[in-house]
Amino acid sequence: MQKIITTIILLAVATPAHAMHISEGILPFNWAALWFAVAVPFVALGVKRLNALAKDDLSFKPLVGLMAAVVFIISCMPVPVPTAGTCSHPCGTGVAAILVGPFVSILITAVALLIQALFLSHGGLTTWGADIVSMGVVGSFAGWFAFRGLRMAGASLGVAGFAAGLMTDWATYFTTSVELASGIRGDAPFWPLFWKILIAFIPTQLPLGILEGAMTAGMVVLLYKKRPDLLVKMRVLKAEEVAA
């Protein structure tokens, strides 16, 4: 009897599960198509960039495969945000953008998101374009610009890496809020819904962004200590910086 009562209570208080990234079917067709149209050129440029770099260095594609695994695993750590209709999670595209560049990072993200949508029910096929734009395009470029900008200003690898991870994470969820508010608002005004969704992410995404910043900084610093030659090879550092 106690087990039956417990089961009834759990079913009564259970909240609906939400797939990671933007859930399947949430965006209307016109908005889903728009984000696909935005994402496709960036993915195509990523393929072109990957092929160009692989011609000069045969070891580049295996490195890209490794980074794809990193992004896939990191972004498979969902924290449900029922009020936003999606989940918070780290992205991993910051460290990918630092090491292989933003365009290849977009391609890596597209592959990781597709596998998650097909086999893990994380995100969806109809929202694949929107997820690529938020996590791949905006996330990768936000992290890359943060890292490069701080390095040019004289910041250490750790500080620049932390900022890259932080900006990647927060920029991704800012864009996700824009995509959700635009797609589901109907005739309602955009800004009140946008702020409502963005604020809903804050309790989880604020600490997750800091965590991803620390994680990105740790990866970059570890590479510098163990394999600085890879950072030179990926043009993250100059040879004279390693020698110094």
Image (cartoon, rainbow, N blue to C red):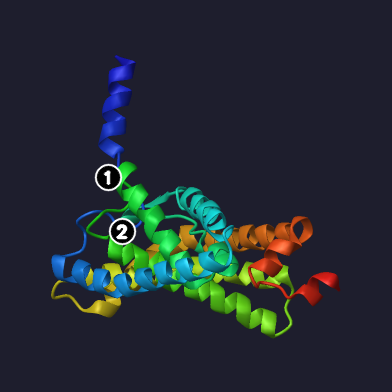
Q: Amino acid at mark 1?
A: Pro
Q: Amino acid at mark 2?
A: Ile
The x, y position of residue 43, in whole percent, is: 36, 68
Q: Closer to the camera, 222 or 50?
A: 50
Disc nearest the viewer among 2 and 1: 2
| Whether residue 185 is situated above or below residue 211 in the rendered picture | below
The x, y position of residue 186, in whole percent, is: 14, 71
**Which type of secondary structure does the marked residue at label 2 adopt?**
loop
Residue found at x 56% / y 60%: 60
- Label 2 neighbourhood size at 10 Å, few (<14), some (14-19), many (20+)? many
Per the image, the residue denoted by label 2 is 22
Marker disc for residue 16: 1
Residue found at x 68% / y 58%: 218
Query: Which quadrant of the structure image shows residue 223?
Result: bottom right
Tell me if I can see residue 171 in this picture: no
The x, y position of residue 76, in whole percent, is: 45, 48
Screen quadrant of the N terminus: top left
Q: Are the residues at dot 2 and dot 1 in contact (C-beta closer than 8 Å)?
A: no
The x, y position of residue 21, in whole percent, is: 35, 57
